[in-house]
DNA sequence: GGTAATCATGTAAACGTTTACATAAATTAT
DNA sequence: ATAATTTATGTAAACGTTTACATGATTACC
């Protein structure tokens, strides 16, 4: 592959001039500029980003770690990160952690190696203590969907408690008093927070908490299928079910439909996240927005700002109810 | 940030020894090795991947360009690419093209700058001529979902014609003779191939092609909604509708459900791709698999192999019918 | 017309690694 | 005991850029 020296030779100028033309960092005569551009084109030359990063001590790369890109939730998040990166002339380095500590650690280390000019990390499995070390050493590192004590201002997340309190309260306000809950089995703060929101809403409205109706499954379609079957063993003990996320709700509804159980006539279902698929379900899923796109955006902006030693204040991330058709008003 | 020199100084060895310990490229005495590891840890040192890539003329990065990561289709693809990357000790650089020529070009150039050790490109908008230049200059570049004449062995794709022929034939075999088609409006080979498959299946079975029933919309939920409304203006002219992809089918079904039109009793719907959401729809969507995960995997493997001047033969990528419940057998 | 300021360009050091080659010490063979 | 081999380590050049500094040419000023 051609180097800047080859270009310089062909254009009959010095390497500095070539660099200046290519980066627009200083004025160059039109004559020289044209010669350089011509030579660049003739040789099919592309600046070597590695050499440049080395010389400039600054890379064009922003690093992102997520659990799994194919999960629509993270898909949306990565998309937002990439858009911010793009408008800042950067490009995304993406790693997946798959909820495994080893993968997450390897990913973080790899991203650090690449001297990213920004780092957004969604890591569930790495212990707080280790994360704290990283956060201390790399002050531009930003966490998403996890709150690390002492680093709250670099943690981007929603109020999960409030969000799930809201969905549960919605069910209660529609006359439901016996409400099941399908939780995520991941060891992750979200899960506890949401479950607590559910419990608190029940308590605040004088509803009984029935531990038989609280399930823990993998927060995926498969998990939802399992949960649906288990839940049906207690069919008469509830009129509604709140879910940790939309994927679970979708799987639940699919099983119910298959068994001839009508949603919402017989069982009401409420989700969490407002994934794009939720509106296509039949009936369309009532759920709560999880503004992951906005979070991805601000996490990236924050990290970039910190990297450049600039001030940046995170906004509040709001959840709000999306009323569709999967919840029945029992009082009508 | 600490450099290898700092480590060498602290460990009282030469930089070469440090490099050897960190890379395991040559035997080092236990004494020296421990000193190095200790120093590395004490300084919180991470090898600079840019400097290494420069010195080794070989990066740890694999580049991928897709339209949009949040599209579940590409999410699955990127996930596969990342897995291959990961098991080859590499990491993914991801760019999005959004079907825009300018973005696609910028993305490709940026990936090339980074001297990726593998390059998988899904670019719709860049003209054949330009793509051919790239493919010629970078013999490890692999295309996905597009066939470029002269570079067939570096183009990973399914037989779209056959796939859509299959879905249409399925409808016909179930007694449908008046079949609508919702196509993608993107200027992309897939779209034409699939549409031709649909047309040919009709012709081969003596069904009439009704141009009123062939729609072109953006292949998204929004597009599907538009299409559904347009199609309903010709409600009595068809009994089934084949769709360019599952997202369109899902949106169609949502509109039908909203209007009280029963699928499959009144209208049968068939999709394409077998996205994860398809099985959650109500009724579950009959569709055809599009093995995008396998394609992502082999595209990445191929590119890596080519980069390393190794032989690699692509397999055939099969589509197959997934029979669910969105198609009614009119003959029963 | 002489000095000062500006401008375009070039030279060379630096960025942080890897690695070919050199060297000294330790081991083995004779 | 000496020579030959092996082993562990160090030295320094290379990778392809950017950029501080130097330089000579041009322009501006009084």
Image (tube, coloured by chain):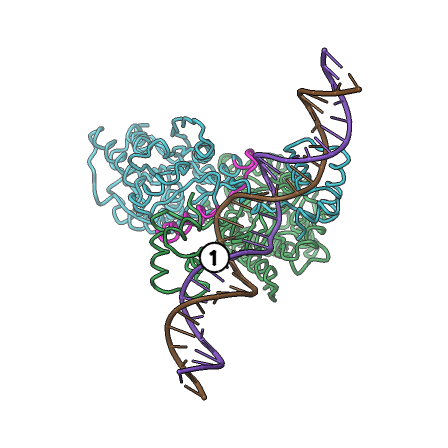
Chain colours: A cyan, B green, C brown, D purple
Q: Determine whether A300 is above or below B287 in the image.
A: above
- In x, y percent, where is residue B297? 53, 57
Q: Chain of mark 1?
A: B
- Out of B47 and B144, give the one closest to the viewer: B47
Q: Determine whether B234 is above or below B169 in the image.
A: above
- In x, y percent, where is residue A138? 39, 39
The image quadrant where one finds the N terminus of chain B is top left
Task: Judge whether residue B274 is colored magenta.
Answer: no
Quarter of image, res A212:
top left
Q: Which residue is mark 1?
A: B89
Quarter of image, res D1:
bottom left
- In x, y percent, where is residue B147? 67, 54
Q: Secondary structure at mark 1?
A: loop
- Out of A265 and A174, give the one closest to the viewer: A174
Q: Determine whether A67 is above or below A302 in the image.
A: below
- In x, y percent, where is residue A300? 46, 35
State the extent of the magenta-drawn residues as a range. Answer: A85-114
- Out of A204 and B10, give the one closest to the viewer: B10
């Amino acid at each position: 592959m051609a180097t800047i020296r080859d270009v310089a030779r062909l254009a009959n100028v010095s390497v500095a001039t070539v660099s200046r033309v290519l980066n627009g960092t200083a004025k160059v005569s039109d004559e020289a500029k044209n010669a350089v551009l011509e030579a660049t084109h003739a040789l099919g030359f592309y600046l070597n980003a590695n050499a440049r990063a080395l010389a400039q001590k600054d890379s064009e790369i922003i690093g992102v770690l997520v659990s799994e890109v194919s999960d629509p939730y993270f898909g949306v998040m990565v998309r937002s990160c990439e858009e911010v990166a793009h408008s800042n002339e950067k490009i995304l380095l993406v790693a997946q952690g798959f909820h495994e500590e080893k993968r997450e650690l390897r990913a973080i280390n790899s991203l650090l190696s690449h001297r990213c000019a920004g780092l957004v990390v969604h890591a569930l499995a790495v212990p707080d203590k280790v994360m704290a070390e990283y956060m201390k050493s790399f002050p531009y590192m930003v966490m998403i969907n996890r709150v690390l004590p002492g680093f709250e201002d670099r943690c981007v997340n929603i109020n999960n408690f409030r969000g799930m309190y809201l969905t549960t309260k919605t069910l209660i306000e529609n006359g439901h008093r016996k409400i099941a809950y399908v939780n995520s089995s991941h060891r992750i703060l979200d899960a506890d927070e949401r479950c607590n929101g559910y419990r608190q809403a029940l308590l605040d409205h004088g509803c009984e908490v029935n531990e038989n109706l609280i399930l823990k499954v993998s927060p995926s379609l498969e998990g939802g299928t399992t949960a649906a079957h288990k839940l049906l063993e207690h069919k008469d003990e509830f009129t509604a079910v709140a879910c940790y996320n939309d994927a679970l709700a979708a799987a639940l509804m699919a099983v119910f439909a298959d068994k001839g159980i009508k949603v919402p006539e017989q069982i009401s279902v409420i989700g969490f996240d407002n994934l794009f698929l939720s509106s296509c379900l039949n009936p369309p899923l009532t759920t709560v927005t999880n503004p992951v796109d906005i979070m991805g955006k601000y996490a990236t902006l924050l990290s970039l700002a910190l990297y450049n030693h600039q001030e940046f204040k995170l906004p509040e991330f709001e959840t709000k109810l999306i009323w569709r058709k999967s919840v029945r008003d029992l009082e009508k």
